[in-house]
Image (tube, rainbow, N blue to C red):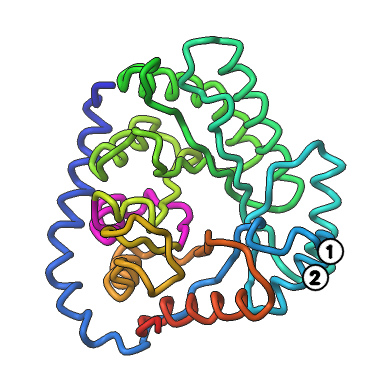
Amino acid sequence: MYINTLTRRRFLAGVAASMAAAPLMRSARADTNGDFDPLPRAVVHNMLPDELSWEERYALAAQCGFEGVEAPPFENEDDAQRHADAAAEAGIRLHSVIFGGWGDPLSHADESVAAAGLNALEASIRGASIIGADTVLLVPGVVNADTRYIEAYERSQQRIREILPLAEELEIVIAVENVWNNFLLSPLEFAQYVDEFESPWLQAYFDVGNVVAFGWPQDWIRTLGERIAKIHYKDFTRSTRDWENLGEGDVDWLEVRQALEEVGYNDYVTSELSSGDEDYLTDVAERMDRINRGMQVV
C-alpha cells in the first residue's frame, strides 16, 4: 500500500499542478455561457426500456440524441457479437461495459470467490474487445465487517495485476469506479491507488453523483485529472439523500464542467439514472448537452 518513489513523484506532481491551475481556471467560470465544446453523450443500458429488443433499445438511444451506450456484461462471445451488430445497425457506439464487481469482489478473502470475479472480469474485457468498446468499469473491492480496508486495498490490487496483461493485449482500460463500497473515500487516495499500478490500462471511472454525500465532484475531478478514463453523470440531494434528475440536486454542474475542461477530459459522459420512455430519455440527453456546453441545466 506504500507509494514507491516513482509513483509518489507522479502523484505529488499531479496534485500540485491541479492546485496551481485551479484558481486561474475557476476565475473563468462566470464567462462560460455555453462556450465549451460538447462532449459525446451516452446512456447506461438499463436506462433504456427493457420491454424492447436490444436492436430497438439501441435505435431508441440514437433517436433520443445519445452518441453512445454503456453495455451490460455479456453471457458469451456470441452474445457480445449480437450486441455489436445491433449497435452498428442503430448507428450508435458501445463505448464501455459496465461490469461491476459487487457479486464476487476481488477483495474477498476466499480465493474461489475472487477467482470467480476475475473470470467474470476477463469475460467482460473480451466482450468489450468484440463490441469495439475501450473500457470496462470495475468496482475493485468492498470494505465491510469481514474485509478490512487494508485487505481490500492489497487484495484488489494484487488480483487486478493478474489480469492487466490481458487488458493491455486487447487494449481495454480497466476503469475503477468510486461507489458506495466503503473504499477509496478521498480523491487523494483514489489517485494514489491508480498511480500505484503504473499502467495506462488501469484508470479511474469517476461518478459525479456518488461523491456528493461526502464531497464535491469538482474537487475530485481536479485531483484525479488525467487519470479519469470515463465519467458518469447523475445528481444527488444531500439533505434528503435522494437521487435526482440532472440539474435537480446539489451538483454544481457549471463547476463540474469547468473542472472537466481544466483536466482536458474529452471522452464520453454517460448518464446513470432511472429508466424511462422516449420523452424522458430525450430530456436527459438535452440536459446533458446543456451541461457539456457549460450552460444552466434547467
Q: Position of residue 73 (x, y in %)?
A: 69, 42
The quadrant in which residue 222 appears is: bottom left
Q: Quadrant of the C terminus?
A: bottom left
* Kind of residue at disc 2: Ala
Above or below, comparing residue 219 to residue 130 in the picture:
below
Q: Position of residue 226 (x, y in %)?
A: 36, 53
Q: Position of residue 201 (x, y in %)?
A: 50, 39
Q: Nearer the viewer, mark 2 or mark 1?
A: 1
* Kind of residue at disc 1: Glu
Q: Which residue is mark 1?
A: 55
Residue in the foreground of this view, choosing between 184 and 28: 184
Residue 237 got which mark? none
Secondary element at image label 2? helix
Looking at the image, which residue is at 42% across and 53% down? 207
Q: Which residue is mark 2?
A: 90
Looking at the image, which residue is at 39% across and 58% down? 242
* Residue segment shown in magenta: 215-233
